Image: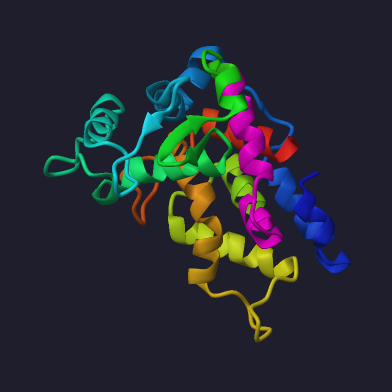
């Protein structure tokens, strides 16, 4: 059972068990090797581009323009963007990918260079292993408990596969956080902007994995079976 479930008040536990049942946690929590490879492709692309020897950043601390352009082109992200798309600070998908890879434990920034972590080197040619690594990282690498609980609640919604609107995801997660006792410093229920901020890292990872489609707007997409399997695996990890 997800860690967050243990914080549910006794009066809501039956409702929460129904919530877990709707997520289908007894459903598939694995994917075929080719699907794992496709889902992890952005992270795999970045780690291979950095390589065993690392990658120097610009003097301002950004990815080199040639790398930004290559990422947008080779990952198929340049379709809806206008311009050169070669500056990381102006190319949100690439910036989000790099920051997400750092948060999830695949790369580090050291003295103006990006270098691979031990885990990334070990998984250099292992898409299935990378898929499992990301499953565990998304579930367990969080800055604080509120972000962890928000992420687990989002994963429950993804596993259920019924939402198509980001506002509905936010509403469901906000309700769950309230049930778990999370409040703002004044004791009030969390505002939508606060919930959005707690979900930022998880949302970016799910975008990179193709579980949510780009461009990511108010109308998202119905999560497909591989995305549901990823969410279940994370919840059960």
Quadrant of image for the N terminus: top right
Q: Nearer the viewer, residue 219 or 93?
A: 93
Name the residue located 62 percent from the left edge and 26 percent from the top edge.
Answer: 119
Q: Residue furthest left?
A: 83
Q: Main secondary structure of the magenta part?
A: helix
Above or below, comparing residue 183 to residue 66 in the picture: below
Asked if 103 appears above or below 182 in the picture, the reply is above
Q: Is residue 25 above or below residue 131?
A: below
Residue at 43% in and 54% down:
165
Q: Nearer the viewer, residue 77 or 224?
A: 77
Quadrant the C terminus occupies: top right
Q: Would you say residue 221 is visible in this rendering?
A: no
Say whether residue 218 is left or right of residue 18. left
> Given the current orientation, which residue lies at the most extreme right position?
10
* Residue extent of the magenta highlight: 129-151
Furthest residue toward front? 111
| Image location (x, y in percent) of residue 27 | 69, 30
Quick one: 60 or 12, which is closer to the camera?
60
- Residue 188 versus residue 169 in the image, above or below: below
What residue sits 71% from the left and 52% below the top? 19
State left or right for residue 32 relative to residue 40. Answer: right
């Amino acid at each position: 059972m997800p860690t967050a479930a243990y914080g549910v008040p006794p009066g809501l536990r039956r409702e929460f068990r129904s919530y877990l049942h709707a997520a289908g946690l007894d459903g598939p929590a694995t994917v075929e090797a080719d699907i794992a490879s496709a889902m992890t492709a952005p992270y795999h692309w970045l780690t291979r581009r950095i390589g065993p020897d690392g990658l120097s950043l610009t003097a301002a601390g950004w990815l080199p323009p040639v790398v930004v352009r290559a990422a947008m082109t080779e990952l198929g992200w340049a379709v809806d963007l206008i311009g050169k798309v070669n500056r990381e600070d102006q190319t949100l998908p690439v910036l989000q990918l790099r920051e997400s890879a750092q948060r999830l434990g695949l790369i580090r920034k050291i003295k103006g260079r990006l270098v691979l972590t031990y885990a990334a080197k070990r998984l250099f040619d292992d898409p299935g292993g990378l898929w499992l690594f990301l499953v565990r990282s998304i579930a367990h690498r969080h800055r604080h408990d509120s972000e962890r609980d928000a992420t687990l609640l989002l994963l429950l919604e993804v596993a259920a596969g019924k939402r198509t609107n980001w506002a509905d995801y936010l509403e469901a997660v906000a309700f769950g956080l309230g049930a778990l006792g999370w409040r703002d410093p004044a004791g009030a229920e969390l505002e939508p902007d606060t919930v959005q901020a707690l979900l930022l890292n998880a949302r970016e990872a799910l975008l990179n994995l193709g579980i949510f489609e780009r461009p990511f707007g108010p109308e998202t997409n119905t999560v497909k079976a591989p995305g549901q399997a990823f969410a279940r695996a994370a919840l059960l990890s």
